[in-house]
Image (tube, rainbow, N blue to C red):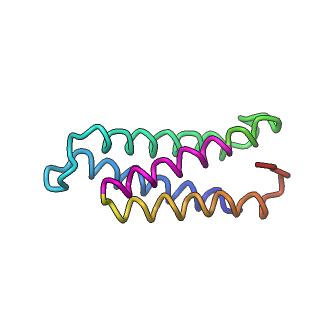
Amino acid sequence: MLLPVSFVFTLAGVVLAGYAALAPDTGVDGTIGAYLALAGAVGSATLLGILLVDGLVPARFWAPVLGFVLFVMILTAIAAFFLMQTLLLAAMVVAALALLASRFTTKRRVVL
C-alpha cells in the first residue's frame, strides 16, 4: 500500500515548507506564498493521517477526500515551484504520484 509512502513524503514536505517559511536564509521567509505552501503541506499531511487510521473515514468519503488531498498536493507543488524550493517541489510530486499509484494498489476500490 502506497498511502504510508505518500504520508512520509508529505511530512517531509511539511518540514521543508516550514524551513522555507521560517528560516531567515531562504529568501522567501515570512512571505505569504511560503506560509500558503506550509498550510498546504500541513493540510495534506493531516488528511492523509486521518485516512491512514482504518475505519475513521467511511468508504463513501474516500474518493472525495483523496481527490481533495491530491488537489492540495498539486497546488503546494506549484507554490514550491514559484518559491524556487526544489526539494519541496520534489517531495510533493513524489507524494502525489504515490497517492495516485495507491488507487491501483490498495485493497479498497477507490475511484478518483
Q: Residue 47: which quarter of the image?
A: top right
The prevailing secondary structure element of the residues shown in magenta is helix
Q: On the rendered structure, is 36 left or right of 24?
A: right
Question: Residue 80 placed where, x, y %?
Answer: 38, 54
Start and end of the magenta stretch?
66-83
Question: Residue 58 placed where, x, y %?
Answer: 79, 34
| Residue at (63, 41) in percent of width and height | 68
Q: On the rendered structure, is 50 left or right of 109?
A: left
Residue 81 located within the stretch drawn in magenta: yes
| Residue at (22, 49) in percent of width and height | 28
Q: Nearer the viewer, residue 46 or 63?
A: 63
| Residue at (55, 59) in percent of width and height | 95
| Residue at (50, 39) in percent of width and height | 43
Q: On the rendered structure, is 57 left or right of 27?
A: right
Question: Residue 60 placed where, x, y %?
Answer: 82, 35
Q: Give the quarter of the figure containing the N terminus.
A: bottom right
Answer above or below: position of 43 versus 110. above
